[in-house]
Structure formats: C-alpha cells, structure tokens
Amino acid sequence: MNNRVNYVVIGILVLIGIAGMALFGYWLLKPTQESEMQRYAIYFNESVLGLNLDAPVKYKGLNVGKVVNLGISKSNSEQVEVLVEILKDTPIKTSTEAQLTSQGITGLSYINLTINGDIDAKPLRAKENEEYPVIKSVPSILIKLENRFIDISEDLADTLQKTSRLLSDKNQDEITTLLKNSTLMISKINSMLDDNTTQNFRQTMKNLKSASEKIDMLIPRVDELVIKSGRFEDNISAAFDSIKNSYLGIQDSINTFSEAIESGEFNIKEITGDMVPTMNNALLDMQNLILKIQETINRYERSPADIVFTQEEIKKGPGEK
C-alpha cells in the first residue's frame, strides 16, 4: 500500500516538472514586443555576390535584422530583389538608404542602413501595389570606385590619344623650328641689350623723369599766367569802358551844344560848364590807359620769360619799401 502511494507522488511530481519545463520553454520562445519583425524589400542594380540568407542588416553598426530571401525582380530582370526582416522599433524612414557592404576580407557582405537627408522624414510605408515597403538602395563603395576608375581610364585614354596626335612627326618638326626661332630671337635680344644700350636706356629714363618734373613745376606757373592775363584783360576792359562812357558824355555835350546853336540859345558858359569836366575825365582815363599799356609792354620787353616762368623783381631805389 505504501509503495503505491510513493509511485503516485513520484508520477505527479514528474508531470508537474514536465509542465513547468514546457511553460519555461514557451516563455523563452514567446515573441515579445521588442523582437517583432517588419519585412521590407530592397532592389539592387549591382551584383549581390557575398550576400547570403540570414546575412545581417545593420543600422549604425547594430544588428537590426537579417536577409530572408534573395531573387530576381519580377518587374525588372536587371535588378536583384532582397527581402529583409527588421525590428519594428528601427527608425526606417523615407530618407533611409540601403548599401551593400563587404565584411573585411572574408568576401561576405551585409546590408548597411543609413539616413541620407532629413532625419525628421516620415516613416517608410508600402505604396499602392507594393507588397512590402521598399527601401531605396545606393551603389556600394566598390561600385563607386569601379565607376570612378572607369571614368579615369576613359579620360586617360582620351588624353593619351590627344597627346599622340600632338606629338606627330609634323608637329614635332614645327615645335623644333619654333624652339630654334625662339633661341635665335633671344640671342638677338641679348646682343642688343649690351652695356651701352642699357646705359642709354637708363639715361633716357632719367631725362624723361626730369622733363616730367619740369612740366609739373611749369603747370602752376601757367595757371598763374592765365589768372594774371585775365586780370590784365579785366583792367583794360574797365579802362575802355570808362573811355567809352567819357566819349558818350562828350557826345551828349556836343549834341546839346549843337541843339543850342540851332535853337539860337548860345550860352557858352552854361554849355561848357557840363562839357569841359566830361572831356577832362575822358582825357585823364585815356592817359591812364596809355600809361598802363606802356608799362606792361616795357616790363615784358625787359623780361619776356616772366610770361611763363617767373615775375620780374623790380629793383627798388634807396629808401623805397
């Protein structure tokens, strides 16, 4: 009886242990919110050699997913369709780009995700007629280097072809002739630029500098001459205006005298009382004008250079200031 009870207890304990292990395993394998995956599609225009199933998908160096399928695109046979599963909490946006990256020297590849552009872009969603959201792909570094190398090779080939055309036999002869002519011209220039020629050139430059300085000194004197000439013309004009007014006064007096004679009123005292002072003033103005003109002529006859260079210094007598 006691043996039966012991077997029953042992059996119950075994069943409880199995159930506990099953629950523990279910708890370990149960997917959590953080490990839920989202599937995306990526289309590459290049070879995906080295990319295998379960290859990692990385974002900023962290493993955020894996490759679940590789195949040819149904819409474009030149593209490779890669399906990946990525953690839902990974920030996959419209500005996210996928690049095929090599893992060192192993030859294996993985997919690297980066954000190019606006970091505040909207989350990536599947468009109409798309089964999965499509992450934009960019060429890998190897493809960029290959394309750049091809461009450089084409440019180098073009340069070599142009250089070959430039260095043809005809062009080489022309270049040789040009170099000979240049050498001949330089030798002639050297022969012309001897010591005497150089000295003459320096003397010419000195004379040119001296002439320039004299011209600079002459310009203010010419300006002064123009100013003095203007003043002299103003004085002469004023003198002629005075003579003109005097003669007009004389003319008026003569007209008055003639009218008096014609009318029979011949009062010489009254008529000459106005006419004589006017004639006297006119004669005095003419005398002053003649004296000024004579003085100017005499001064320039004594020193003609005063017109351009300097003004004659009149020697003063003893006691004059």
Image: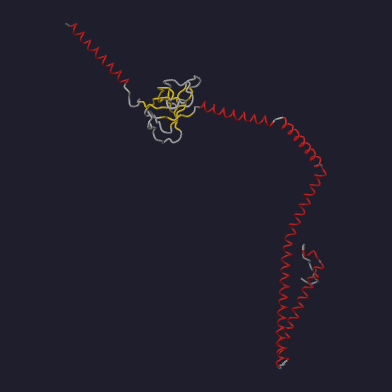
Instruction: Please tell me whether residue 181 is drawn above or below residue 258 in the rendered image.
Output: above
Residue 92 placement (x, y as % from top left):
40, 31
Nearer to us in this view, 36 or 318: 36
In this orientation, which residue lies closer to the viewer: 289 or 147? Answer: 147
Spot occupied by residue 33 in the image (x, y as percentages of width and height): 33, 27
Residue at 79% across, 49% down:
204
Total count of labels: 0
| Residue at the image position 74 percent from the left and 62 percent from the top | 222
Which one is nearer the viewer's eye here, 64 or 50? 50
Residue 180 appears at what percent x and percent y?
77, 35
Q: Is residue 234 left or right of residue 44?
A: right
Question: In the image, is residue 285 above or below residue 259?
Answer: above
Which quadrant of the view contains residue 91? top left
Figure quadrant of the C terminus: bottom right
Q: Quadrant of the N terminus?
A: top left
Answer with the quarter of the image where residue 32 lies. top left
Q: Which residue is pictured at 18% across the width and 7% down the height?
A: 4
Instruction: Indicate how the structure is coloured in the image.
Output: secondary structure
